[in-house]
Amino acid sequence: MKQTLSARAPSLFEEVVAETSGLGENLNTCIQCGTCGGSCPSGDDMDHTPREIFALIREDMRDEVLSSNTPWYCVSCYYCMARCPQDIHITDIMYALKRMAIKEGLYQKSGKDKAPEFSETFIGFVENNGRSFELGLATRYHLRHHPLDAVKMATGMGLQLFTKGRMDLIPPKIKGVDQLKAILKKSKELGGEA
């Protein structure tokens, strides 16, 4: 008698690997060192550090992972990836988790209404200028959600960065920003987001 095996649903880990085109495959090599969270400029606002998210992914805790604000606060600076001793593609995993949360509508249930706004602001600067504008991003976010922190950041780290020529006061634009906008527009049309 021939038995048929029922196909099992993919685990959250397998879905993340697929969503990152295989880049997330070494996620299971995370040694839980905490370097990623310690490196993250927006780590204090995350409800889970990246290493906690990775542990939750391995435990197949789908709702908790996809409802987390962690991916939404990723500013794509790649500092975590540069410092990760296991060469985990952390930023790519965060993008994958955002896409998955959007597809399943779980980010809306999270109650973390500030996180998508933060991400949209970041993406808006990139789409309009070809790169991020840290001063604008930090100012808009902190003035809206943490006004007292904005003053502390401006007089502390902000002043140091400005005096060393490391902070632009107006958004810098890349050469060929109009071509980038055309590419992004076409990409959205092909992806059904137009």
Image (cartoon, rainbow, N blue to C red):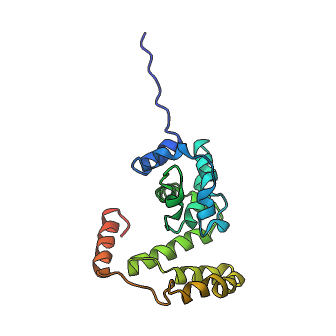
Q: Residue furthest right?
A: 148
Rendered position, 24 above or below 92: above
- Indicate the quadrant where residue 131 lies: bottom left
Expressed as whole percent of the image width and height from the top left, the position of residue 151 reads: 68, 87
Given residues 2 and 116, the one toward you in this image is: 116
173 left or right, relative to 50: left
Expressed as whole percent of the image width and height from the top left, the position of residue 41 reads: 60, 70
> In the image, what residue occupies the spot 53% across and 84% down?
136
Expressed as whole percent of the image width and height from the top left, the position of residue 60 reads: 59, 42
21 left or right, relative to 151: left
> In the image, what residue occupies the spot 28% across and 80% down?
176
Expressed as whole percent of the image width and height from the top left, the position of residue 126 reads: 42, 76
Given residues 29 and 161, the one toward you in this image is: 161
Q: Residue furthest top?
A: 1
Rendered position, 143 above or below 7: below
> In the image, what residue occupies the spot 48% across and 45% down?
26
Q: Residue furthest front?
A: 164
Given residues 41 and 193, the one toward you in this image is: 41
Task: Work out which quarter of the rendered image holds the C terminus and state it.
Answer: bottom left
Task: Work out which quarter of the rendered image holds the N terminus and state it.
Answer: top left
Total marks placed: 0
